């Protein structure tokens, strides 16, 4: 006897049809998140990115090699159309974010995957001003993991609050030697035969999946969505918090010991003390951090008129 049909993650189509999505950044993470949301029913999809596709990005990007040296925003627009999204519903903006802020204050969600933290702060301020839900995705250096920040009500909890909770306000940019991208031709023989398999496509795809699910939950459901940072670690150890000595460390140590007793692979550990704090690291697991309004947040005084360098 067949059981009842199960339909997980069924969304309200009327909400989708009424929604405009704005993608700030069409790099590897943003483009793959876009691919997961390539439905023909959206009211509008806006793609903003001033840059061209580089050869070192191609192994982990939704676009193919024919778009190398061409604008990513236009390439993503054309590829969305190829996947069935009506062309009149897709807008590509090859330029800075500030130029189109006021055109899209009716957005249902801002999907952000830019590297420049200053631009993220300005987009956050724009989202806070118009209370536009903000979903931010990024991949850690060398593809060790990544994170998805979901901010359903930026007027209450914004990106600056998230960065404050994570202790990331001293951001100074990605190190030049982080080995995030590479030229895929380096992995071919002189005859053109492949000699290695690129490794960053899978981590990027996983983060993009989580971003897309978060967008759909925020836009197309009525359930309560809490502001969170979901940190994801793959096989390598990734730091997620820094803790002071105290009761919570004892409880976490007991949990770590319990994993060993249950013959489980250890997914959490403490690193050596640094400046009075102990780094908490995870692997092969997720770490969802609930967010609250940060007491030192100054986002509500930010100027939203000069975002550039996406």
Image: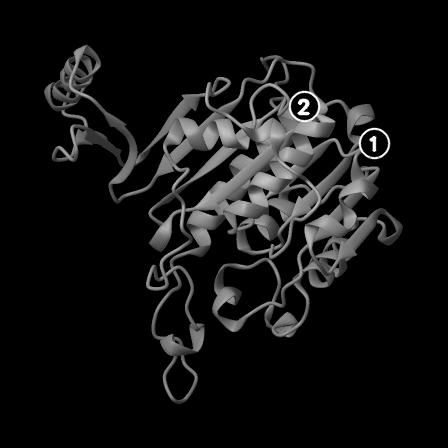
Report how many numbered discs are placed on residues in the image.
Answer: 2
Give the quadrant of residue 146. top left
Q: Which residue is mark 2?
A: 10
Position of 308 compared to 187: left or right? Answer: right
- Badge 2 crowding class, 10 Å Cα cut-off, few under 14, some 14 to 19, many 20 or more, is few
Q: Position of residue 101 (x, y in %)?
A: 76, 43
Q: Taking 193 as reference, is 144 above or below it?
A: above
> Helix, strand or loop at disc 1?
helix
Is residue 257 at least partly visible in the picture? yes
Q: Taking 103 as reference, is 14 above or below it?
A: above
Q: Residue at x 59, y 34 (%)?
A: 135
Q: Position of residue 290 (x, y in %)?
A: 44, 19
- Badge 1 crowding class, 10 Å Cα cut-off, few under 14, some 14 to 19, many 20 or more, is some
> Helix, strand or loop at disc 2?
loop
Q: CA distance from mark 2 to mark 1?
A: 14 Å
Residue reaching furthest to the bottom: 190
Position of 26 compared to 255: left or right? Answer: right
Give the quadrant of residue 246. top left
Q: Residue at x 70, y 59 (%)?
A: 73
Q: Which residue is mark 1?
A: 17
Quadrant housing the C terminus: bottom right
**Badge nearest the viewer, 2 or 1:** 1
Q: Taking 53 as reference, is 283 above or below it?
A: above
Q: Residue at x 39, y 59 (%)?
A: 180
Give the quadrant of residue 284. top left
Q: Identify which residue, 95 or 238, lies in the foreground.
A: 95
Position of 27 compared to 75: left or right? Answer: left
Whichever of labels 2 and 1 marks the residue nearer the N terminus, that label is: 2
Colour style of the rendered protein structure: one colour
Q: Identify which residue, 153 or 30, lies in the foreground.
A: 153
């Amino acid at each position: 006897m067949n059981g009842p049909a199960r339909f997980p993650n069924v969304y309200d189509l009327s909400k989708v049809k009424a929604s405009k999505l704005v993608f700030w950044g069409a790099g590897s993470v943003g483009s793959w998140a876009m691919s997961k949301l390539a439905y023909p029913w959206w009211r509008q999809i806006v793609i903003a990115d001033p840059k061209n596709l580089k050869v070192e990005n191609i192994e982990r990007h939704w676009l193919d090699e024919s778009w190398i040296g061409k604008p990513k925003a236009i390439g993503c627009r054309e590829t969305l159309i190829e996947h069935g999204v009506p062309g009149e519903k897709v807008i590509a903006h090859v330029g800075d974010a500030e130029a189109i802020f006021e055109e899209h204050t009716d957005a249902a969600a801002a999907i952000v995957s830019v590297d420049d933290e200053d631009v993220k702060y300005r987009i956050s301020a724009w989202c806070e001003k118009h209370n536009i839900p903000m979903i931010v995705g990024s991949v850690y250096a060398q593809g060790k993991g990544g994170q998805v920040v979901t901010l359903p009500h930026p007027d209450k909890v914004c990106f600056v609050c998230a960065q404050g909770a994570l202790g990331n306000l001293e951001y100074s940019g990605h190190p030049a030697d982080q080995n995030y991208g590479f030229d895929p031709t380096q992995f071919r023989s002189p005859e053109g035969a492949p000699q290695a398999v690129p490794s960053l496509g899978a981590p990027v795809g996983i983060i993009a999946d989580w971003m897309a699910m978060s967008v759909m939950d925020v836009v197309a459901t009525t359930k309560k969505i809490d502001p969170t940072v979901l940190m994801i670690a793959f096989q390598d150890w990734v730091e997620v918090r820094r803790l002071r000595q105290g009761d919570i460390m004892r409880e976490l140590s007991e949990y770590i010991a319990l994993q060993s007793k249950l013959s489980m692979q250890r997914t959490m550990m403490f690193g050596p003390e640094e400046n009075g704090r102990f780094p908490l690291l995870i692997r092969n697991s997720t770490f969802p951090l609930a967010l609250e309004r940060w007491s030192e947040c100054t986002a509500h005084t930010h100027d939203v008129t000069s975002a550039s360098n996406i």
